[in-house]
Image (cartoon, rainbow, N blue to C red):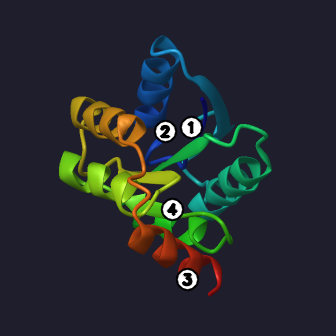
Amino acid sequence: MQIFIGADHNGFKLKQHLSRYLMMSGYEVVDVGDVSLDPHDDFPNYAKKLAVSLLASKDKEARGILICGSGQGMCMAANRFKGIRASICWNLAEARSARNDDDSNVLCLSAHQQNDKEAVSIVHTWLITPFAGAARFKRRIKELDEL
């Protein structure tokens, strides 16, 4: 599975840690930036790069992970793109729900609120949780796509 990952300066360190974890776990990691720590970068640029890359991916199971200080900005930016279902997950229950109920394809994390260990647990849970595919969940996703 292809995993696109991006972060601004606030999430840069956590992105590096998660990228290593994902590669060691056998995922194909595509880093959309920032490629070096730049305290003056802006999160919307990386959310856009990730969304465009994810939507263009030939891997239909591909997903994305975005990290900024709060996770909020990345989530707002990513959700501007039709076909992106970005969710902020603060814990394992939210990671499971985001995948199971909403077929989330982009996970947004807060570098200020989650340490490396917590972030790895959330990412792992989010990646291994399948979409339940219940009729009501599919209907809601279709409604999102039609907005």
SS assignment at label 3: helix
Marks 2 and 4: CB-CB under 8 Å?
A: no
Q: Earlier in the sequence, mark 1 or mark 3?
A: 1
Amino acid type at circle 2 is Phe
Q: Earlier in the sequence, mark 1 or mark 2?
A: 2
Task: Tell me where residue 117 sits by quadrant.
Answer: top left
**What is the distance, in whole Å, between disc 2 and disc 4 at their CAs?**
13 Å
The answer to whether the residue labelled 3 contacts the one labelled 2, judged by CB atoms less than 8 Å apart, is no
Closer to the camera, 38 or 64?
64
Q: Amino acid at mark 1?
A: Leu
Per the image, the residue denoted by label 3 is 143
Q: Marks 1 and 2: CB-CB under 8 Å?
A: yes
Q: Label 3: how many residues lie within 10 Å, few (<14), some (14-19) or many (20+)?
A: few
Task: Tell me if label 1 and label 4 are in contact, CB under 8 Å.
Answer: no
Q: Which secondary structure lies at badge 2? A: helix
Residue to which mark 2 is pinned: 12
Q: Is residue 38 left or right of residue 45?
A: left
Spot occupied by residue 14 in the image (x, y as percentages of width and height): 40, 35
Circle on res. 74: 4
In the rendering, which numbered label is found on residue 37? 1
- Residue at x 42% of width, y 25% of height: 17
Residue at mark 1 to residue at mark 2: CA–CA distance: 6 Å
Closer to us: 27 or 111: 27
